[in-house]
Amino acid sequence: MDWNKANTILITAFIILNIFLFASIIDTTTSTEYNPNNDENFKNNVISLLEEKNIKINTKIPEDSFVLPILETEYEIIEINSRLMEQFLHERIEPMEDVYSYSNSKGETLEIIDGKKLRLTLRKKSMEEITGQLNIQEEINNFTEEKNIDIKGYNLHYTHTFENEIIHIYTENHNGFSMDNSYMYFFLDNEGIYKFEMQRISSVKEIPEKVRLISAIEALPRILTYPEIADKEIVNIQMTYYSVEDENWKNIERINSDPMWKVIFSDGTQKHLPGID
């Protein structure tokens, strides 16, 4: 990524946002407390700004105001041992130092990524179209029972359907808000589950001082900080907790998780926009 270009886009987006806010505040002479959710001019300006990149909004923009704590989260570090192999590959395989990918006699592959992510690939994805005969919940229940995966505390957060694939995403919640870094992904084709990915937070602690978050309409211009996001349709906007997983993620065991507005697009793309000004 060209970070100079990304920074320029970010600065430009913030400048435009501040201009909108300043202009709107000047127009608002009858209210002592400005609320951008009540400012149609501001909303229209944001919509027009996104339309310049052919980004359409096809969902209700939340008008909720939030004052939430930042979370201090600690991650479950996966210990690679023979017990893990038996649990997911059903064979006794002795792990080797600095080896993070293992396969069994069936060709199933278990990968440990960044010490925290577990990915199990059972087979290649079928390219056949999914029919209505697939019982997804039964597939997930059978899989988690067979692999002895404790799904307690995780709830179905999001589903995306392609022509030949369905992705069910379960996340852990904190006080009703999804913690998007603590997840279980179930990838299904017309034959059932073909891949599974998991990352889990082991402990959560609220930082005492709470923060007031910007509204969803104020956060939306920050989509412009992602140069690759264009020609898309927004189908959902929701408040979640999230920590950015960058190139240093493999070294992270404990990190703060911030309240962020998550934007979901019709093609399944998701972007988290900072909720803290």
Image: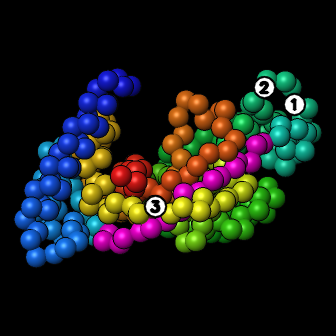
Q: Nearer the viewer, residue 243 or 166?
A: 243
Up the image or down, 77 lies above or below 101; here it is below
Q: Which residue is depicted at the point 36% across and 25% down? A: 3
Q: Is residue 172 magenta?
A: no
Q: Secondary structure at mark 3?
A: strand
- The residue singled out by tag 1 in the image is 95
**Residue 63 included in the magenta stretch of the image:** yes
What residue do we see at 19% from left, 73% from top?
32
Using a 10 Å C-alpha cutoff, classify the residue at mark 1 as few (fewer than 14 neighbours), some (14 to 19) or many (20 or more).
some
Looking at the picture, how far across and down is residue 258, in whole percent?
Answer: 51, 53
Element carrying mark 1: loop
User: In the rendering, at what x and y percent does residue 274 appear?
Assistant: 40, 51
The first of marks 3 and 2 along the sequence is 2
**Quadrant position of residue 106:** top right
Q: Are marks 1 and 3 in contact (CB under 8 Å)?
A: no
In the picture of the structure, the residue carrying the numbered disc 2 is 99
Q: In terms of secondary structure, where does tag 2 sit?
A: loop
